[in-house]
Amino acid sequence: MVPPMMDRATRWLVVLVAFIAATVAMVAIVPPTRAAAQLAPEQAVTAGSTVLLPVAPCRLFDSRETPNAGRLDASSWRIPVTQRCNVPVGARAAALNVVATDTQGAGYVTAWPSGSARPTVSNLNYVAGSVVANSVVVQLGGGGEVDVYTHGPAQVVVDITAVFVDAAGPASAGRLVPVTPSRLLDTRITGQRGASELLVPLPPGVPSDATAVAVSITAVDAASGGFLTAYPAGTQRPFVSVVNADTNNRTRASLALVPVTSDGFMLYRRMTTDVVVDFWGWFTGASAELSSAGMFVPQSPVRMWDSRSTYDPLHAGGTIEKALAPAGAAAVLSNVTIAEPVGPGFVSVFPAGTTRPFVSSLNHRWTNPVGALTLTGVSSRGVGFYGSSGVHVIVDVAGVFTGAPVAADAGIAPNSFPPPNSPVIMISDSAFAGIRWSGALAYLQGAAWDARLESCRRLIGVSCRGREGYAPRTAVSELSRVPAGAYRTLIVATGYNDWSGSFPWGVDAMMAQARAKGINRVIWLTYREQVGYVSPGGASNQASFAANNRYLRSVSAAGKFPELILADWNGYSRWRPSWLTADGVHLTATGAPQAAMYVSRKLAFLERRPCPPGIGGPATPGGWCADPDVTGPPR
């Protein structure tokens, strides 16, 4: 769940008032060691500029231990930051790691300056039973505090790694030096998968007195739930986390501003996992020249792009450019959330019109939203977003770093609809075998279809003997025989013949087999409820079909299977009696093409493709096929 965006005029008003007004009010304060005549014009400091001051990673708040401390209401806390964990009075912003745990349902977390209205942004998203962490850089309120809100029942843990303090003038230490992103560590290549500590040395070219590095840390294919901790090399390991993984999402990424020593930083793994570390920039030390470039100008977070509202999502292999920062910014710090992914993949954020780096900003596998703090340079055309798989993108900007943007010297990359050739396997019983019997297979369009439609098929156990004189393999057995990785999507249209008491076991077994085969999306058709049908042997009937639908909705809402998507065939077909025989389950010659077209349009909607030309259908404002469960059947 991600909150909706504010209107375009409001979002730019917030950014421009905060940044342009500050630019007009630029002042040049001469440090005691230099005369005013020695300062170049570009060393004038933008009002509101700050520099980074590292602190030893430290836990600020844990609602599990002190649930009522700073409680504002049932969903919000006010957390003091200054004068704790060695944070000085007057700190303007804080680099935090926020964890949502003990989650009871779907929701999101928002952090913002205390005492101000809660903005329409999110910092991380969660579902029931998940443990999710993300880095947050947030401006502090007047009392040196931050407010945190949970939209959905959850406990919250907050750790701190650095703060930003006012820059009285051009500074040496604490300024960001952005770099072309590069990969520092990949244990999949080095063979260091495990649960041990890892030393990550300072990257080449980074001075030994650098104060911190900006790195993306990704736990890859963790063997179990757990967390990662990053801290300065040669110091005592703190009781904090930077990345958390759970059983449903074992690949997690987060950008972190990690304090370093001359030896670099350490990574502690509280789980067996591979780790990937990508380098985005470093913060200067005392040996650096005086300058105003690379200072951070924090702001209350503001939503700058929500493709769900603007109907311009990333398609697979596509790139979109957005202007996220006003003139005078060299880099932008933002929280990027992806929603409704078409399939597993990653998103890279980079200066628009430049060569896309071989790194990722965040990774996703299932259909749940995933958010990550991102730091990216800005070009003369803005910021580019690349998606390896189709995703909606939501961007909330927390501030910018001063300096000159890089030149955009590449053409604008395309963002085209995906081709209609994704591999799909559909497994059904006689309820949808009518598509084959009626000669309506040609209406399954828009994908590479493998339709295995058999009479009397069950999910598990032993199938009954069908109208064609044999008992087909069960759905789980049928799926077990396909090659791993052969299909991206599974469509389940069977279960009418299963014993009602064993149906949950059948769902669990089917989902487990789908995961074993590398299937990332399971579309399960709901069962017809207004029927007179009784399955062979009295295994199931109208009451059990309604109970099965309730079970499917409950596991979907609970997030037990993030890849599970319900297609409401029961609702879609309810007012079309001519599509069904007298028993209310089996398809007529009229209903068979309609059922095939329904499934085809549902798949096109989920893959954000135009409706197949051969069958057509309503479209969204973005041009892809509309959800047939929303538009209903043709009139």
Image (tube, rainbow, N blue to C red):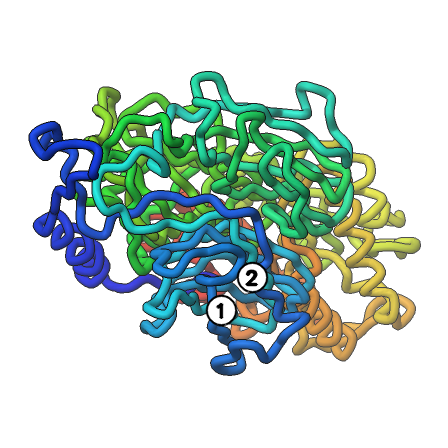
Amino acid type assigned to the residue bearing label 2 in the image? Leu
Front-most of 502 and 369?
Answer: 369
Front-most of 60 and 626?
Answer: 60
Q: Is residue 169 left or right of residue 347?
A: left
- Residue assigned mark 2: 60
Mark 2 and mark 1: span between their CA atoms? 8 Å
Picture quarter containing residue 569? bottom right
Q: Position of residue 31 (x, y in %)?
A: 20, 39
**Label 2 with label 1: CB-CB less than 8 Å:** yes
Q: Mark 2 Cα within 10 Å, few/some/many (few <14, many 20+)?
A: some
- Residue assigned mark 1: 79
Query: Can residue 58 be seen at all in this image of the molecule?
Result: yes
Query: Can residue 249 be seen at all in this image of the molecule?
Result: no
Instruction: Give me the residue at 92% from left, 54% from top.
Output: 462
Amino acid type assigned to the residue bearing label 1 in the image? Ile
In the displayed image of the protein, which residue is found farthest to the bottom?
A: 73
Q: Could you tell me which secondary element the residue under label 1 belongs to?
A: strand
Instruction: Give me the residue at 69% from left, 76% from top.
Output: 531
Q: Position of residue 505 (x, y in %)?
A: 85, 61
Q: Is residue 349 left or right of residue 599?
A: left
Q: Could you tell me which secondary element the residue under label 2 belongs to?
A: strand
